[in-house]
Amino acid sequence: MAEAVFAVAAVLMLAGAIGVVASRNPVHAALFLVQTLVGVALLFILNDAHFLAAVQVVVYAGAIVILFLFVIMLLGVDKAEELRVEPIFGQRPLAAVIGAALAAVLGTVILTTADVLSGIRRSGGERALDGEATDIERMGRVLFGEFAFAVEITAALLTIAVVGAVVLTRRAARSDGAAPAGPGSG
């Protein structure tokens, strides 16, 4: 059963990754990215990391890809671009060489860490005993205990960024001569 789930997740991730790279439309590329991230979440579930799978789907496949789509639509680059013109001479051969080098490094890492990964797999996942905190509980206590100030500052910065994006969008709409979108317009 685990091998079948792994095979499905691997095919899902590979097809999504190829779709991200090969897609000419940025919106389609973002949707293929969601497919890839769902495949990663399946692998997390297969490894009994249910919290990481939930975070993968909610944060990455949900929020981050929605942010990508928002920026794509806001900037108006949701059209296919002309790919025959090279702005930088020789960028495609250079990209092919760098891609091959990265593939070689990845292959080397996979081959050299196979023993380490098999040892981790044999040890199995440890469950919390009665009275012991799970990893998620410990992470929550550290985040909202020792690093509570950093979490609050991060939340404030993200809120300010969202408000700033909304303000800039409304300002850009007004400078184009369009009426501002809102409850009073219509």
Image (spheres, rainbow, N blue to C red):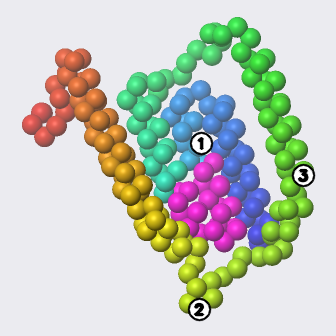
Q: Residue sitting at 47 percent across and 38 percent down?
A: 68
Mark 2 nearby-residue class (10 Å; few <14, some 14–19, many ≥20): few
Q: Which mark is residue 130?
A: 2
Q: Amino acid at mark 3?
A: Thr
* Label 3 or label 1, whichever comes before in sequence order: 1
Residue projecting furthest to the front: 146
The residue closer to the viewer here, 163 or 184, is 163
The residue under label 3 is: 112
Q: Quadrant of the C terminus?
A: top left
Location of residue 64 with respect to 116 vertically, above or below = above
Location of residue 50 with respect to 34 vertically, above or below = below
SS assignment for the magenta stretch, majority: helix
Mark pair 3, 2: CA separation? 37 Å
Mark 3 nearby-residue class (10 Å; few <14, some 14–19, many ≥20): few
Q: Residue sitting at 66 percent across and 33 percent down?
A: 21
Image quadrant assignment for residue 145: bottom left
The local secondary structure at tag 2 comes to: loop
Location of residue 128 with respect to 142 vertically, above or below = below
Residue projecting furthest to the left: 184
The residue under label 1 is: 32
The local secondary structure at tag 1 comes to: helix
Mark pair 3, 1: CA separation? 30 Å
Is residue 141 shown left or right of residue 125?
Answer: left
Mark 3 vs mark 1: in front: 3
Q: Horizontal and vertical percent for residue 161?
A: 34, 40
* Label 3 or label 2, whichever comes before in sequence order: 3
The residue closer to the viewer here, 107 or 174, is 107
CB within 8 Å, label 3 to label 2? no
Q: Quadrant of the N terminus?
A: bottom right
Give the residues in magenta: 36-57
Q: Amino acid at mark 1?
A: Phe
